[in-house]
């Protein structure tokens, strides 16, 4: 997916939300002023695009955006997260799982992600979650959408793995639709 393709939705998303360029610029300015008073936030590393995407995904609720930015920056400083991302050397496995964003948004500007766990025995949760973290990082910086819907085919999985995945994904507040058999 080309980065410019993701930003093409920006104008349509703003119109859908009933917001103008001035509204967005004002909100970014509010966040920039707030970040000046937060020395622990590396504001120079947070682009205006990233701020805009957080504003959009949080329905223009600035206090909620501030909280998300705090969490985002705190998470980046946790040793286990840095370890996962710094040691990221393998490409996503299509043997045990695939997980891809659809190129076109829904009519209410949500991004659909399609996934499938194909082989539970070969599934390495740590590695696959690292892949998802890298993908979500990319999406959080470049994707002008209002939200996400995740559809995961888990017909080849036990209830134990399904429960683990639901606990980790649903805790993030992301709509998740699972398909599985009752074998």
Image: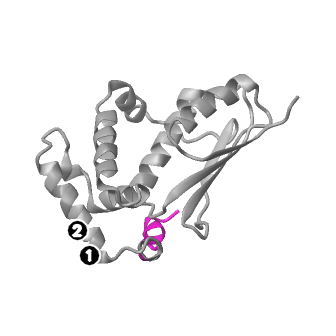
Mark 2 lies on a secondary structure that is: helix
Q: Could you tell me what secondary structure mostly forms the magenta stretch? A: helix
For disc 2, the neighbor class at 10 Å (few under 14, some 14 to 19, many from 20) is few
Q: Nearer the viewer, residue 25 or 157?
A: 25
Residue at the location (36% across, 55% down)?
A: 54
Q: Residue at x 56, y 59 (%)?
A: 111
Q: Position of residue 9 (x, y in %)?
A: 47, 72
* Residue receiving disc 2: 26
Magenta-drawn segment: 1-11
Q: Which residue is at the front of the view, 91 or 11?
A: 11
Residue 16 point in image, percent of width and height:
48, 74
Q: Is residue 61 left or right of residue 27?
A: right
Q: Quadrant of residue 180?
A: top right
Q: Does residue 24 sit above or below 167 in this rendering?
A: below
- The x and y percentages for residue 112 are 61, 57
Q: Is residue 44 left or right of residue 17?
A: left
Left or right of 62? Residue 134 is right
Residue under label 1, please give it: 22
Asked which secondary structure carries label 1, the reply is helix
Q: Is residue 6 magenta?
A: yes
Quadrant including the C terminus: top right
Residue occupying the point 32% across, 36% down: 76
- Seen in the picture, residue 162 relative to 139 is either above or below; the reply is above
Is residue 84 left or right of 173 when viewed as pictured? Answer: left
Q: CA distance from mark 2 to mark 1?
A: 6 Å
Where is 13 relative to 93, above or below?
below
| Residue nearest the viewer, comparing 20 with 179 | 20
Could you tell me which residue is drawn at 38 percent across and 59 percent down? 53
């Amino acid at each position: 997916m080309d980065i410019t393709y993701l930003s093409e939705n920006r104008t349509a998303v703003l119109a859908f939300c009933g917001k103008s360029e001035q509204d967005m610029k004002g909100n970014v300015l509010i966040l920039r002023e707030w970040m000046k008073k937060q020395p622990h936030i590396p504001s120079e590393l947070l682009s205006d695009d990233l701020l805009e995407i957080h504003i959009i995904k949080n329905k223009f609720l600035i206090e909620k955006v501030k909280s998300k930015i705090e969490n985002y920056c705190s998470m980046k400083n946790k040793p286990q997260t840095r370890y996962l991302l710094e040691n990221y050397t393998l490409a996503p496995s299509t043997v045990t799982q695939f997980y891809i964003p659809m190129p076109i948004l829904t009519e209410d500007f949500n991004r659909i992600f399609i996934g499938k766990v194909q082989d539970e025995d070969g599934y390495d949760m740590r590695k696959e979650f690292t892949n998802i973290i890298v993908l979500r990082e990319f999406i959080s910086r470049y994707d002008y959408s209002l939200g996400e819907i995740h559809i995961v085919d888990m017909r080849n999985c036990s209830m134990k793995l399904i429960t683990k995945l639901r606990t980790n994904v649903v805790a993030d507040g992301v709509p998740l639709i699972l398909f599985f058999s009752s074998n």
